[in-house]
Image (tube, rainbow, N blue to C red):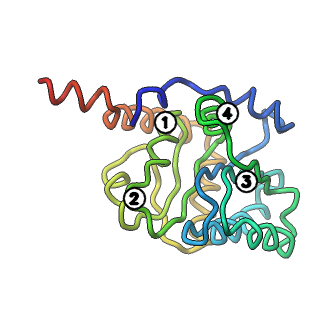
Amino acid sequence: LSNELYKPGNGLAFRKKFVISPERPVLIHIGRVAHEKNIGCLLQMVDILRQSVPDLLFIIAGEGPAQKHLVGMVKSLGLQHHVQFTGNLDRDTELLDCYRAGDVFVFGSRTETQGLVLLEAMAQAVPVVSIAELGTIDILHNCKGAIVSPEDTHTFAARVKTLLSNREMRQQLADDAHIYAQTRSARHFAEKTIR
């Protein structure tokens, strides 16, 4: 990971810009809005979770070919007040702020080769709930800053709910995530190579 990604983002500024209350529970997904990213599964999870977390907001940052389908899905599930599409964000400014605005980063892709967005979220001290397939297994294996879930929407929702309802656990995972991501930084690898 580039060392730039470790500069702390300003989550409160992001929330203010997008008119999101500082107290509102926010889930984040950042990446290409493509069918293989399995964002539809995350929307189904949000539909379940909003029953017990009625003020929940799911932010989807990025653009791609699945957006029209997902917007339709949001409408059919009645999630208009629970999902916000931001489009693409400036990588040097808004992106880090978006990560930092989240209470939990959620990820459901089955086809990742690397899953770098997981490390980017963790570099911003945001705990992760994700399925572990292909490239994401390498990142999530033995990672204390993330919770792995099967691709079952009810189980996924329950794991996210546990994190949202337990501030102490969420903070511990955030701290662990940040430490873990530092072991994957470009600087860390360079220093390791030099040693």
Coordinates of residue 114 in the picture (x, y in percent): 38, 55
- Residue named by callout 1: 172
Name the N-terminal-most of marks 3 and 2: 3
Asked if labels 4 and 3 touch by Cβ distance under 8 angstroms, the answer is no
The amino acid beneath tag 1 is Gln
Say what secondary structure mark 4 lies in.
Answer: helix
Cα–Cα span, label 3 and label 2: 21 Å
User: For the residues carrying marks 1 and 3, which lies nearer the camera in this image?
Assistant: 3
Cα–Cα span, label 1 and label 4: 25 Å
Q: Is residue 48 above or below residue 54?
A: below
Name the N-terminal-most of marks 2 and 1: 2
Cα–Cα span, label 2 and label 1: 21 Å
Cα–Cα span, label 1 and label 3: 22 Å
User: Who's the residue at 57% across and 59% down the image?
Assistant: 159
Name the N-terminal-most of marks 4 and 2: 4
The amino acid beneath tag 2 is Thr
- Residue named by callout 3: 58
Mark 1, other Cα within 10 Å: few <14 / some 14–19 / many ≥20:
some
- Residue named by callout 4: 94
Asked if labels 3 and 1 touch by Cβ distance under 8 angstroms, the answer is no
Split into 4 quadrants, where in the image is the C terminus?
top left
User: Who's the residue at 68% across and 50% down the image?
Assistant: 61
